[in-house]
Image (tube, helix red, strand yellow):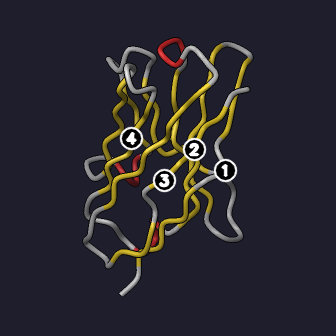
């Protein structure tokens, strides 16, 4: 049974930092492209960052470029999202997703709230 479990969310002041983690089990983690998405209330789910299966390639949505960093540790079967210089508009439920061809698995999400 595949499981993706996110952690690390919370309440942070504008300008602060958080590091999200997504721990995977039940799949050959090193074969999967990993992605972080977010969904704010009343908005569609948005792709935030992508990392290739080896970690050699990353992509970001323009709004987080230069502030967020996606990384992975295949030995620990974990993907991370380091979020710096957080803004109120980054407030959302953050999900990780594992993709391999037609296979796709989602975590349950972790809430990030940026507020003073």
| Residue holding disc 1 | 108
Q: Secondary structure at mark 3?
A: strand
| Residue holding disc 4 | 80
The image quarter containing residue 40 is: bottom right
Separation (CA) of disc 2 from disc 3:
7 Å
Which residue occupies the foreground of this view, 44 or 35? 35
Q: Are marks 1 and 2 in contact (CB under 8 Å)?
A: yes
Separation (CA) of disc 1 from disc 3:
10 Å
* Residue depicted at x 37% and y 20%: 75
Image location of residue 18, percent across then percent down: 33, 60
Q: Secondary structure at mark 1?
A: loop
Counting residues from the N terminus, which is met first, the one under dot 1 or under dot 3? 3
Q: Are marks 2 and 3 in contact (CB under 8 Å)?
A: yes
The image quarter containing residue 79 is: top left
Q: Secondary structure at mark 4?
A: strand
Q: Residues within 10 Å of mark 3 (few under 14, many from 20)?
A: some
Query: Tag on residue 7?
Result: 3
Counting residues from the N terminus, which is met first, the one under dot 1 or under dot 2? 2
């Amino acid at each position: 049974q595949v499981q993706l479990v996110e952690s690390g969310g919370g309440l942070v002041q504008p300008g602060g930092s958080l590091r999200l983690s997504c721990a995977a089990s039940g799949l050959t983690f090193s074969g999967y492209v990993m992605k972080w998405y977010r969904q704010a209330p009343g908005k569609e789910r948005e792709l935030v960052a992508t990392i290739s299966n080896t970690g050699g390639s990353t992509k970001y949505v323009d709004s987080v470029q230069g502030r967020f960093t996606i990384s992975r540790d295949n030995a620990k079967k974990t993907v991370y999202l380091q979020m710096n210089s957080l803004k109120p508009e980054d407030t959302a439920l953050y999900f990780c997703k594992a993709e391999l061809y037609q296979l796709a698995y989602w975590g349950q999400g972790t809430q990030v709230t940026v507020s003073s």
